[in-house]
Image (spheres, grey):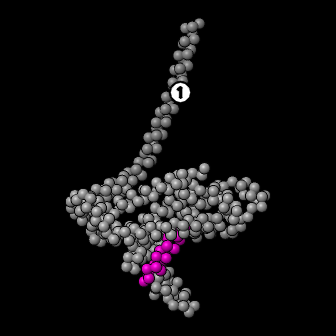
Amino acid sequence: MKETTNSQVQSKDYEYAREIKPKKKKKDNLQKWAFLFILANLILFLLFFAWPAILGFYYSFTEYNGNTATFIGLANYIELFQDPSFYKAMSRTFLYTLLGVPLVYCSSLLVSVLLTSKHTKGKTIAKTIFFFPWLVSPIVVGVLWRWMFGESFGFINFVIQTVGGNPVPWFSNGNFAFVVVLFATAWAGTAFNMLIFIGALISIPKSLYEAADVDGATGWQKFWNITLPSIRSTSFLVILLSTFNLMKEFPMVQTLTNGGPGTDTLFAVQYIYETGFNQLKVGYASAASMVLFVILLVFSLLQFRFSKGGRVDE
């Protein structure tokens, strides 16, 4: 009986092994296919992001004009931190971000709440209209707003003159140009953030609002005590992405104002572009880009720290 029992156990183990082996093989094949699917993106990331970043870090320690690179140590960084133009560009960038992030956040959230409200009609058409800025490139956005606020041919000045007013020097006055850039940024940034907020808003359980209605809560009370806490993690994501986008904004501002008038809308990335490509100080521009990278990294870490990584739990 004992021998029979052992042979039965061995037979069962053999059958079990035969069943497990094909499953492991199938799992290995799936992992290989998964790796192949991400291989293209990985190659693009290494070629166009990782490798240029490594080169930029190396060039920041060299005097490089596009032809030959001579190692000069920390000379570029020392010169950079003694350059008043760099501090002015960074201060404009911080002000632009400080004002732009709340503007983009509030406009995106407002549009999202209206488009998810049961009282709003024509939601499909409205979503298409508000999403339009995301379908066009930032360069087109800059050209469009340049046409709208052109001083001698712009649509806004045409309307002002039609009602008897004087044309506004939108791009000759630094303060006006800064305001135009801010509102163009909010218009362009609302589209993508709107989709993120809509996804978060429709996932909030309706039972919470129904319970609030029973308690006699007003619309503002429901928004403040239910909606905002429920989308805390989404708000963190929108603020983080908006901060990154504003800190490194280039094509729209370059097309819209070209950093002018003077340097009133010359932000950090425009400053790097100007020194690197127009003045051919590639090593110096690389040092400035490394400083900007460190600032963005520190800012993102602080946001994660103080927002608990965007978690909604206390």
Residue situated in front as seen by the camera: 264 or 169 = 264
The x, y position of residue 298, in whole percent, is: 43, 56
Residue furthest bottom as drawn: 164
What's drawn in magenta, residue-wise? 171-190
Quarter of the picture containing the N terminus is: top right
Q: Which residue is most to the front?
A: 82
Tell whether 311 sits left or right of 211: left
Residue 146 is situated, as x and y percent measured from the top left of the image, at 46, 79
**At 46% across and 40% down in the image, what residue appears?**
31
The answer to which quarter of the image holds residue 286 is bottom left
Crowding around mark 1 (Cα neighbors within 10 Å: few <14, some 14 to 19, many 20+) is few
Which residue, given by chain and number where applicable, does mark 1 sit on?
19
Q: Going 49% across and 32% down the picture, which residue do you hit?
A: 24
Tell me, yes or no, whether the highlighted magenta stretch contains residue 289: no
Magenta span: chief secondary structure: helix
Quarter of the image for residue 72 reads bottom left
Instruction: Estimate the x, y position of residue 188 in percent, counting from the top left.
Output: 51, 69
| Residue 205 drawn at (x, y percent) | 69, 54
Relative to residue 17, is residue 310 depicted above or below?
below
Using the rendered image of the protein, determine whether residue 258 is visible from the camera's viewpoint. no
